[in-house]
Image (spheres, helix red, strand yellow):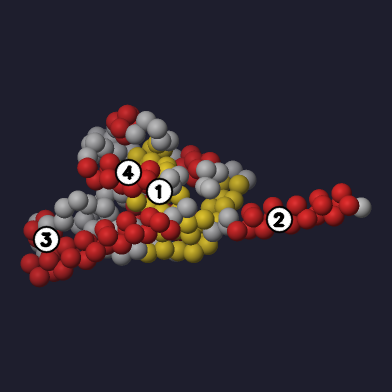
Amino acid sequence: MVMKILKNFFKRVFSNLFKNRKNIKLGFYGPPNAGKTSLANRICKDFTGEEIGTVSKIPHETRKIQFKEKVEIKSKGKAMVFKMIDTPGIATKIDYEDFMKYRMKKKDAKNRAKEATQGVIEAIKWLDDMDMVVVVLDASENPYNQVNITIIGNLVARKIPVLIVANKVDLKDADIKKIEAAFPEYDVVGISAKYGTNLEEFYESIFKLSKKIK
């Protein structure tokens, strides 16, 4: 009788612990135009029917934190619930003149630069609220740069579980091996958010990473 009571007690405890781990806060970080919002949009659209934000060829389209609650990702018989958090692109320098190259008026360009700068600060602050993070990098770009090192460094300092996504594998110049060489201590998954390439492996990696949450 005592054993049965104890078994039921521990069953309730572990059940409650599992429930508390639901709706894991999953953040999408990376440099501008790497495809963070495109990936978050595809996931949210596939599992909720709604996108999380807008995308544009102009850098820093996402300038504020945007999120979607209770996104249940299902893959190969597994299912987990996440709070998807899409963040502004991290940059060490934001110049309004760069936006004017996209035929923006000077006033609009300056306003966008100001908002983008505030977005970077907000994104870094939000790191303290993340359970796990997906760092989205453009597989056709050189991964060895100050921005990427800054992002990874901030995550390491906070001991946040990380998955690196090499996005845009559909591009001719894409090179996943460069990203793997740059960050050998992390799992790297090559995908195309635009075409939905290799998302099953991405989901499997997300489930695997969730086990590292403390």
Mark in the foreground, 3 or 2: 2
Q: Looking at the image, tell me whether mark 4 or mark 3 is earlier in sequence order.
A: 3
- Check whether the beta carbons of the residues at disc 1 and disc 2 lie within 8 A of each other: no
| Secondary structure state at the residue bearing disc 1 | helix
Please name the residue that numbered disc 3 is placed on: 96
| Secondary structure state at the residue bearing disc 4 | helix
Query: Which quadrant would residue 63 be assigned to in this image?
Result: bottom left
Mark in the foreground, 3 or 1: 1
Q: Looking at the image, tell me whether mark 3 or mark 2 is earlier in sequence order.
A: 2
Horizontal side of 147 relative to 10 (left or right) equals left
Label 3, label 2: how far apart the Cα atoms are: 54 Å
Amino acid type, callout 2: Val
Amino acid type, callout 3: Tyr
Query: Which quadrant would residue 153 be assigned to in this image?
Result: top left
Q: Is residue 98 visible?
A: yes
Residue 201 in the image: state x and y as whole percent.
48, 39
Residue 59 in the image: state x and y as whole percent.
21, 56
Please name the residue that numbered disc 1 is placed on: 158
